[in-house]
């Protein structure tokens, strides 16, 4: 008998002679094993003892079959290695299972030594996969910790520069003020990038907390646009705000909404050369008008879209570099930046729009972009109005 392994194996087959023989053989080879004579028993066992590292799973069983058991196991985010056992005629299904995440398959009848080899290989691959995931996780955690720890000193730097700029420590001339303000703007850009990164991670972990309340969209848009008036002027860009009529009540988390609009205006400023224009507009529109908008087909419609009677439409339009047509869908993906040299030089992490999309979809809204290269861009947000 071999030395005891830490690996625990579940053998699932409706033929008792196979499960028993396999159990004896694997126990003899140092594994801890359990047996299940049906898919139902396998799932119940798997639910109560989550520490199986490998599962030998028959494909054809009465009741819940092996393909369904595999799917349920995968849905439970288990990292167990699954080796499918296929009878004559079910090889195609076995290949299908491999595509869906099974580690390997073996055709019946099989030699036990062959089965042992496959289990050992599957367990080695499982360990390698888990080590890779752990390393990736450690890298991400390190970046997040670093980003988080950078935020406090950065905020302190902004505060100190502001004190000097506000002349609390003595007279500062206009040119010096300009430089100090540029330093503050650059620090704020880094803070926004860190916030996007940290919040996207929180979204992934399901830990992003929102305080959803009703707000007047026009007020929110006006306020955030005001904050961009100075940097726009500094960059020689004309920024106008168009606020339409209608109550425009929306249910959002104020900070998250402000950061979405801030990311869009920040992008427009970044990608619009001196002398250009940015227009941000906010309108209440009827459901009928919304349904006739030219929304790109790849944008998922929120569940109640057709039934909704009123929407708030916010759009940020600029006369900047524009975005090539075939990049429009991709720019909302994380780390997606298309690489014209001049744009890479402008910095950024490619996280702003990914953040905007997640937040807007959380508010049951939609966000999309329209643009032509060198002809400016328009980003549109559609959010359901709250009933009065
Ligand atoms: N208004 C715009 N005009 C031209 N290109 C844009 C505009 N907005 C976004 N893009 C393109 O989409 C990419 C992704 O934008 P996103 O805001 O996600 O990232 P970023 O601005 O590069 O970095 P970050 O927002 O993380 O600082 C940009 O790098 C740019 O290529
Ligand atoms: Mg951005």
Image: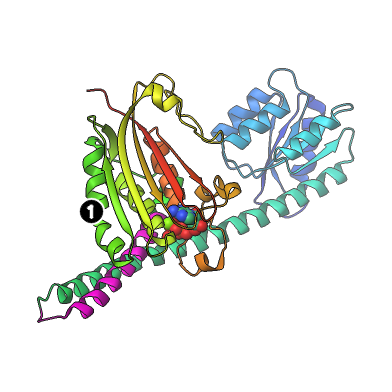
| Quarter assignment of residue 64 | top right
Apparent side of residue 287 relative to residue 115 in the rendered image (left or right): left
Q: Residue at x 87, y 45 (%)?
A: 114
Looking at this view, is 34 or 177 the one in front? Answer: 177
Q: Residue 259: horizontal and vertical position, in percent?
A: 33, 50
Residue farthest toward the front in the current orientation of the protein? 275
Residue named by callout 1: 226
Q: Residue 209: horizontal and vertical position, in percent?
A: 32, 43
Q: Residue at x 24, y 43 (%)?
A: 220
Quadrant housing the C terminus: top left
Q: Main secondary structure of the magenta part?
A: helix
Looking at this view, is 219 or 258 the one in front? Answer: 219
Q: Residue 119: horizontal and vertical position, in percent?
A: 77, 46
Q: Is residue 172 magenta?
A: yes
Apparent side of residue 161 relative to residue 130 in the rendered image (left or right): left
The crowd level at tag 1 (other Cα within 10 Å; few <14, some 14-19, many 20+) is: few
Question: What number of labels is visible?
Answer: 1
Picture layout, residue 20 above or below residue 327:
above
Q: Is mark 1 within 8 Å of ligand 1?
A: no
Picture layout, residue 205 above or below residue 91:
below
Picture layout, residue 208 above or below residue 247:
below
Apparent side of residue 314 relative to residue 143 in the rendered image (left or right): left
Q: Element under label 1?
A: helix
Residue 225 visible in the picture: yes
Range covered by the magenta-colored residues: 169-197
Rendered image coloring scheme: rainbow
Residue 351 visible in the picture: no
| Quarter assignment of residue 128 | bottom right
Q: Residue at x 67, y 29 (%)?
A: 69
Looking at this view, is 386 or 289 the one in front? Answer: 289
Q: Residue 268: horizontal and vertical position, in percent?
A: 40, 55
Q: Is residue 60 magenta?
A: no
């Amino acid at each position: 008998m071999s030395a005891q392994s830490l690996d625990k194996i579940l053998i699932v087959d409706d033929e008792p002679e196979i499960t028993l023989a396999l159990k004896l053989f694997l126990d003899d080879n140092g594994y801890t094993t359990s047996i299940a004579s049906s898919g139902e028993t396998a799932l119940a066992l798997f639910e109560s003892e989550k520490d199986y590292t490998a599962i030998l799973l028959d494909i054809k069983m009465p009741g819940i079959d092996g393909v369904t058991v595999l799917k349920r196991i995968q849905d439970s985010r288990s990292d167990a290695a699954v080796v499918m056992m296929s009878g004559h005629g079910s090889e195609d299904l076995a290949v299908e299972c491999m595509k869906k995440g099974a580690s390997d398959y073996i055709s019946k009848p099989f030699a036990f030594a062959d089965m042992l080899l496959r289990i050992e290989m599957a367990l080695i691959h499982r360990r390698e996969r888990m080590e890779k995931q752990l390393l990736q996780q450690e890298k991400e955690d390190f970046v997040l910790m670093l980003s988080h720890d950078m935020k406090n000193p950065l905020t302190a730097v902004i505060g100190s520069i502001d004190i000097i700029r506000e002349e609390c420590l003595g007279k500062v001339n206009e040119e010096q003020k300009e430089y100090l303000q540029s330093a503050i703007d650059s620090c704020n850009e880094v803070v926004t990038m860190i916030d996007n990164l940290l919040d996207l991670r929180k979204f992934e972990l399901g830990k992003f907390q929102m305080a959803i309340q009703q707000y007047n969209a026009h007020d929110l848009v006006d306020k955030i646009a005001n904050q961009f008036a100075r940097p726009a002027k500094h960059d020689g860009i004309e920024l106008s705000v168009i606020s339409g009529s209608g109550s425009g009540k929306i249910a959002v988390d104020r900070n998250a909404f402000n950061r979405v609009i801030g990311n869009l205006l920040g992008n427009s400023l970044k990608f619009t050369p001196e002398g250009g224009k940015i227009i941000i507009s906010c309108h209440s529109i009827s459901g009928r008008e919304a349904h006739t908008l030219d929304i790109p087909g790849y944008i998922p419609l929120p569940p109640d879209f057709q039934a909704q009677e009123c929407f708030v439409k916010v759009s940020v339009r600029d006369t900047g570099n524009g975005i090539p047509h075939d990049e429009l869908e991709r720019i909302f993906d994380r780390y997606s930046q298309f690489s014209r040299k001049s744009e890479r030089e402008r910095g950024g992490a490619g996280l702003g729009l990914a953040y905007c999309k997640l937040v807007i979809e959380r508010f049951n809204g939609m966000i999309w972009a329209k643009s032509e290269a060198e002809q400016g861009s328009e980003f549109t947000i559609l959010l359901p109005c709250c009933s009065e």
